[in-house]
């Protein structure tokens, strides 16, 4: 799966915000912000990645149980799907 | 990484301050986009309600009209969302609907102009009818404090006040 085209990350203060670049009308009330691990997942996903690859990456970067990392990734992917910004390969 | 961080690898922008968000809004307006965001602050009551009203803006063209709502950066580099009450060439006289003081700004400092606003799922266009209502409110400006207190007491709950 992969992040669709037309989204960029912008750093504002300590947060990273996902901004849709191709939409003519942007609603800032529904916009997505990412923290450090969210940004990591996003950057990996923008090149395309499987869930197993994301899990491996999170486990490498953070001291986290596999089960917890797995559920976080699923939560994250669900959120991206809800915003229609993920395309399943 | 703490477990708190882990479980918030995504979140909505609500925690973001408008101060950090507005430069982003400005950039999108300059790129020709139409942007919608939540209004903060009480200076535009009774038309716009803090944390309740969503306003939709575009980059200003040359056709700014009297009683338009505009976003601009003032001399203190603060972003302000107020109303044009007079246009004199390239100078604008600006006032918040709930305020008594005015500001004089250059036409060029306007970043965005409102197209519409939505409060409690009611969408209203900035059209001649809105400008007429704003004109009427402007005529009653000397009784503003009393009227605002009455409005707040009567309808405040509806707008989270």
Image (tube, rainbow, N blue to C red):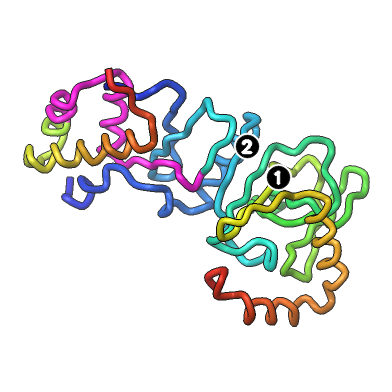
Secondary structure, mark 1, is strand
Instruction: Tell me: residue B54, above or below residue B138.
Output: above
Q: Residue at x 17, y 27 (%)?
A: A51
Q: Earlier in the sequence, mark 1 or mark 2?
A: 2
| Among the 4 quarters of the image, the one containing residue A65 | top left
Query: Regarding mark 2 in the picture, which secondary structure is present there?
Result: strand
Please report the bounds of the magenta region as a residue range: A28-57
- Using the image, name the chain to which the residue with label 1 belongs: B
Is disc 1 in contact with disc 2, using a CB cutoff of under 8 Å?
yes
Residue A33 lies, in percent from the top left, at 38, 42
Q: Quadrant of residue A34?
A: top left
Image quarter where the C terminus of chain B lies is bottom right
Q: Nearer the viewer, residue A72 or A59?
A: A72
Q: Which residue is mark 1?
A: B115
Q: Position of residue B47 (x, y in %)?
A: 69, 63
User: Could you tell me residue A32's position as x and y percent?
Assistant: 40, 41
> Quarter of the image holding residue A25?
top right
Queried whether the magenta region covers residue B59, the answer comes back as no
- Give the camera-side residue of B12 and B115: B115
The N terminus of chain B, quarter of image: top left
Image position of A10 (left or right of B105) = left
Compared to residue B106, the image places residue A43 above or below, namely above
Depth check: give the residue in front, A63 or B35.
B35
Q: Residue at x 39, y 43 (%)?
A: A15
What residue is disc 2 on? B34
């Amino acid at each position: 799966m992969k992040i669709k085209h037309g989204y960029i990350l912008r750093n504002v203060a300590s947060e990273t915000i996902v901004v849709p670049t191709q939409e003519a009308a942007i609603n800032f009330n529904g916009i997505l912000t990412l923290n450090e691990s969210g940004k990591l997942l996003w950057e990996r996903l923008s090149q395309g990645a499987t869930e197993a690859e994301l899990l491996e990456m999170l486990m490498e970067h953070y001291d986290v149980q596999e089960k917890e990392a797995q559920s976080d990734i699923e939560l994250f992917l669900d959120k991206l799907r809800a915003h229609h910004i993920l395309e399943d390969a | 990484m703490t477990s708190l961080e882990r479980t918030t690898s995504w979140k909505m922008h609500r925690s973001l301050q408008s101060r950090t968000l507005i430069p982003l809004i400005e950039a999108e307006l300059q790129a020709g986009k139409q942007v919608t965001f939540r209004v903060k602050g009480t200076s535009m009551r009774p038309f716009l309600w803090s944390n309740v009203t969503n306003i939709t803006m575009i980059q200003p063209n040359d056709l700014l009209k009297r009683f338009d709502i505009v976003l601009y950066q003032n001399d203190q580099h603060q972003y302000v969302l107020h109303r044009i009450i007079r246009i004199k060439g390239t100078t604008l006289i600006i006032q918040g609907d709930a305020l008594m003081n005015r500001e004089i700004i250059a036409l060029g400092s306007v970043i965005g102009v409102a197209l519409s606003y939505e409060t409690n799922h009611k969408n209203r266009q900035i059209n001649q009818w809105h400008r007429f209502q704003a004109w009427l409110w402007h005529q009653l400006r000397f009784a503003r404090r009393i009227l605002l207190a009455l409005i707040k007491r009567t309808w405040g709950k509806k707008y989270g006040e």
